[in-house]
Amino acid sequence: MKRKTLLILFLIAGSFNVFGQNIEIIGGLNHNVFHDYNNSEDHFVSTYKPGLGFCAGIRLDSVKVDWMNMSFALQFDQINGELKARNGGLGYGHHTNAKINKSIISLGIFPLNFSIFRRIDLNIGLEISGLINESITGTVSGWSMGGSNWSSDINEKYSRYCSLICVGLKGRIACDIPVTNTIYIAPQYSYYHGLTKEFDEFPEETRSMRHYFCIGIKKRIK
């Protein structure tokens, strides 16, 4: 297993030298905002509190794939947020209060890449993320007419709360500030808009919006 892992890392590193024009190491903060589109439902009410997290990753720019000029990013994120949601109808009700802390690893694929004045980079693409770990605190409660009220710790109610895979659109703008002929400092802002659900449990239709404020160190390989 270790040999296979080393071989994969070696092939990836080799591909950097062959195909990558620029390689960049990135770190910074993310500001996560959970939200949903279900507020039109009469019995559904939700409120969300944003959270601050951090991220770190690596990017490859100017990767030639046939005729396309692509960019790729591999990134780790620690994401936070809070939610309160309730739903019900005549004779029953359901409430969830939770604080969310989760770690994800994501792959960004950017087919749309633009350079403005050879200093401003604009990238637009798709990001696919996988859940590494979640830490959820909170309660799930409910009631029904003719029955008793109940309440449970969210970790006792659900074995896993967050979705394993999430997909979203991502845009990035960065300014390349030269340090040497091949080294650049790149302050940057990115925005992620989730297209798939963040949670497998109620409220299932919750999505994520994330703002990223990062600094990158870029090296031109070719």
Image (cartoon, helix red, strand yellow):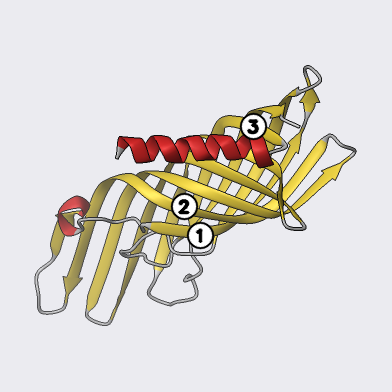
Task: Describe the element under mark 3 as helix, strand or loop.
Answer: strand
Picture coordinates of residue 209, whole percent (x, y): 55, 53
Q: Residue at x 47, y 71 (%)?
A: 38
The answer to which of marks 2 and 1 sits earlier in the sequence is: 2
Q: Report which residue position mark 1 lands on.
A: 167
Picture coordinates of residue 166, whole percent (x, y): 45, 58
Task: Give the class, few, some or many, for how many residues have Cα within 10 Å of label 2's Cα (few <14, many ≥20).
Answer: many
Q: Amino acid at mark 2?
A: Ser
Q: Residue at x 25, y 71 (%)?
A: 93
Task: Describe the element under mark 2 as helix, strand or loop.
Answer: strand
Image quadrant where one finds the C terminus: top right
Q: Report which residue position mark 2 lands on.
A: 129
Left or right side of 43 for 189:
right
Q: Amino acid at mark 1?
A: Val
The answer to which of marks 3 and 1 sits earlier in the sequence is: 3
Task: Describe the element under mark 1 as helix, strand or loop.
Answer: strand
Left or right side of 122 for 135:
left
Q: Report which residue position mark 3 lands on.
A: 24
